[in-house]
Image: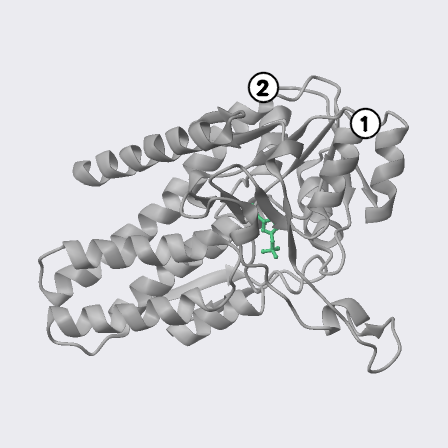
Amino acid sequence: MRTVFWEDNKVKMIDQRLLPGTFVLAEFDTVEGIARSIREMYVRGAPAIGATAAFGMALAALRSQATDREGLLADLRAAKATLDAARPTAVNLSWATARLLTLAEQTQADVDALRQALLAEAQAVADEDVEINRRMGFHGAELIPDGANVLHHCNTGALAAVDFGTALGVIYACQEQGKRIHVWVDETRPRLQGARLTAWELMRAEVPMHLIADNAAGHLMRTGQVDVVIFGADRVAANGDVANKIGTYKLSVVAKENGIPVYAVVPTSTIDLNLPDGDHIPIEERGPEEVTHIGETVIAPENVPVYNPAFDVTPHRYITGIVTEEGVCYPPFTQSLRKAKEAAEARIAARRRQR
Ligand SMILES: CSC[C@H]1O[C@H](OP(=O)(O)O)[C@H](O)[C@@H]1O
């Protein structure tokens, strides 16, 4: 089952807030509901958020009462503003809403034809994501030796995408190729995407793993128990600086200190060439309850002051390579990322011409 999909003129998704204990689908049929599903992390993970936002734009077109093209475009622009505001860091969100809005603005068609074109484009975003993830899995698996111990942060599997995943997609590709690998799964405080989601995915896939406290990662790297560090990203700046789940920077610095390669696995939709470096990437700050509670259990004093940044930025000097669907990008990232992004955009344009 895909993490997010369109059915019966609704957007349906696995409610990841309740995993691993409860597997249920949530469904939304308004733009505001889609924005809430992203903001409250029913669905999370940059590529999954992007596909959800694309379906949100198709839903906006379907629900628009406009009888002319300009009226529909106005409703789509309003929907883009609502969806883009849901979470600031993952560029896939605004990338997806911009892709749908641009298609509408460039298509001279009546309202009904535009509605159909937008739903087809949203479905294409979702279908492409699965293909892109499999391509990244193939490219990334070439970096992982048989028998490797891999340290992974947060969740980047099928739950973080439409299906298959990004960094965990590399793990799944290694498994399909018969490589014997083991994964150290960072629990990933405070939302525990590693403990709740990655452990759940890898156990279902029967990938050898151990769940670790985030603070155990340094010990494992210093004592030679980690061969490669791998993670996803929410936004990559033009120079290769990587914004990813909080804790990624610390992992990458310690990995470099111990001579361990670090790879970010990133669809080109996550690369933001408009930002020169990571200092320009907006970092989402989330509520204190994520830090003071584990589920319903309170783990801190009442009214304790909390600061809860959801992401951090890893400077490109700590990144060995960035795995994209177009291949592995190596320093100087400014050139290699641009080349990958241009190749991917040409592929999308060629596919749209074939439709
Ligand atoms: C391929 S998922 C990218 C990225 O998204 C996750 O963040 P969140 O769970 O808050 O949406 C995490 O940073 C993953 O690495």
Q: Secondary structure at mark 1?
A: loop
**In the rendered image, which quarter contains the C terminus?**
top left
Q: Secondary structure at mark 2?
A: loop
Other-residue count near label 1 (Cα within 10 Å), few / some / many at <14 / 14–19 / ≥20: some
Q: Position of residue 78 (x, y in %)?
A: 31, 73
The residue under the point 71% across, 60% down is 191
Dot 2 or dot 1: first in sequence order is: 2
Which of the two marks, 2 or 1, is nearer to us in this view? 1
Q: Establish if 286 lies above or below 144.
A: below
Instruction: Find residue 251 and report its image quarter.
Output: top right
Please state which amino acid type lies under the numbered disc 1: Asn
Residue in the foreground of this view, choosing between 238 and 180: 238
Q: Position of residue 58 (x, y in %)?
A: 30, 62
Instruction: Looking at this view, name the residue that lies furthest to the bottom.
Output: 303
Count of numbered circles on the image: 2
Q: Which mark is residue 41?
A: none
Left or right, 345 with respect to 306, comes to: left
Instruction: Find residue 179 and report its image quarter.
Output: top right
Q: Position of residue 350 (x, y in %)?
A: 22, 34
The residue under the point 37% across, 54% down is 96
Determine contact: label 2, label 1, CB under 8 Å. Answer: no
Please state which amino acid type lies under the numbered disc 2: Glu
- Residue 333 visible in this rendered orientation of the protein: yes
- Distance of label 2 from label 1 (alpha carbons): 22 Å
Instruction: Find residue 310 and report its image quarter.
Output: bottom right
Instruction: Confirm or reject: label 2 Cβ below 8 Å from ligand 1.
Output: no
Q: Establish if 352 lies above or below 17.
A: above
The residue under the point 28% across, 51% down is 121
The residue carrying mark 1 is: 258
The residue under the point 37% across, 64% down is 56
The residue carrying mark 2 is: 142
